[in-house]
């Protein structure tokens, strides 16, 4: 992030919650949060969700903001998202070029964070963010995203 000011994650958390409380249809609400994030955080260049299909051990792309991706369906175990789905844990990847099991969304992406989303203890999907900067994500992003994941969870479908 260089000398740039850190995002105000406390205010952003409140803005996300306000957005989700407007009673919009699920995917619309999720999409509006994508738009908010990419607008407010300069290094969130792609922000989206993958929904879990546990019976098929598959992730399916949900709403997103950023460049279109070829990775509409990702099997558990494949790429950063698929590995995060298996371990149900956060993956923070400072430099995607150093990853062997990685699915490139665009040539511009340099770092990525994937945060699992749980509803009533069950894994229902994940938040996925790509940055065009190397090493863009810190523990502050991880804490922020883990904080809003439970707010987003009710908007994820149970497939
Ligand atoms: N990079 C991810 C795939 C998702 S796209 O970046 C949107 C991965 O390796 O799983």
Image (spheres, rainbow, N blue to C red):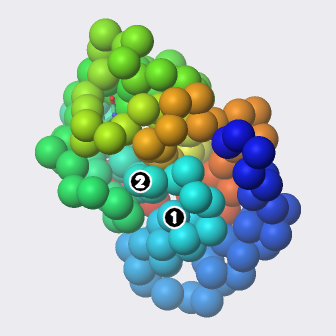
Is 100 located above or below residue 85 in the figure? above
Category of crowding for the residue at label 1, using alpha-carbon neighbours closer than 10 angstroms: few (below 14), some (14–19), many (at least 20): some
* Residue 138 location (% of width, % of height): 71, 34
* Residue 103 location (% of width, % of height): 26, 28
Residue at horizontal 58 percent and vertical 58 percent from the top? 42
Q: Nearer the viewer, residue 91 or 39?
A: 39
Horizontally, is 4 left or right of 39 in the view?
right
Asked if disc 2 is less than 8 Å from ligand 1, the answer is yes
**Label of residue 38 in the image:** 1
* Residue 69 location (% of width, % of height): 21, 49
Residue at horizontal 25 percent and vertical 37 percent from the top? 107
The residue beneath circle 2 is 46
Q: Nearer the viewer, residue 105 or 84?
A: 105
Q: Real-space Cα distance between discs 2 and 1?
A: 7 Å
Q: Earlier in the sequence, mark 2 or mark 1?
A: 1
- Looking at the image, do the residues carrying marks 2 and 1 touch, with CB atoms under 8 Å apart? yes
Picture quadrant of residue 141: top right
Residue at horizontal 36 percent and vertical 18 percent from the top? 97
**Label of residue 122 in the image:** none
Horizontally, is 113 left or right of 27 in the view?
right
Helix, strand or loop at mark 1: helix
């Amino acid at each position: 992030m260089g000398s740039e000011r850190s995002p105000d994650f406390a205010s952003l958390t409140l803005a996300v919650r306000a957005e989700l409380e407007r009673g919009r249809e699920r995917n619309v609400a999720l999409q509006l949060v994508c738009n908010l994030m990419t607008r407010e955080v300069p290094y969130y260049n792609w922000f989206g969700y993958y929904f879990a299909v546990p019976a098929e051990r598959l992730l399916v792309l949900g709403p997103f903001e950023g460049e279109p991706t070829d990775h509409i369906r990702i099997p558990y175990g494949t790429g950063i998202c698929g590995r995060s789905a298996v371990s149900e844990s956060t993956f923070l990847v400072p430099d995607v070029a150093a990853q062997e099991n990685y699915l490139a969304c665009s040539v511009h992406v340099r770092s990525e964070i994937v945060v699992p989303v749980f509803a009533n203890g069950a894994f229902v999907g994940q938040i996925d963010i790509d940055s065009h900067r190397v090493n863009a994500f810190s523990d502050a992003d991880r804490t922020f995203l883990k904080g809003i994941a439970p707010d987003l969870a009710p908007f994820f479908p149970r497939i």
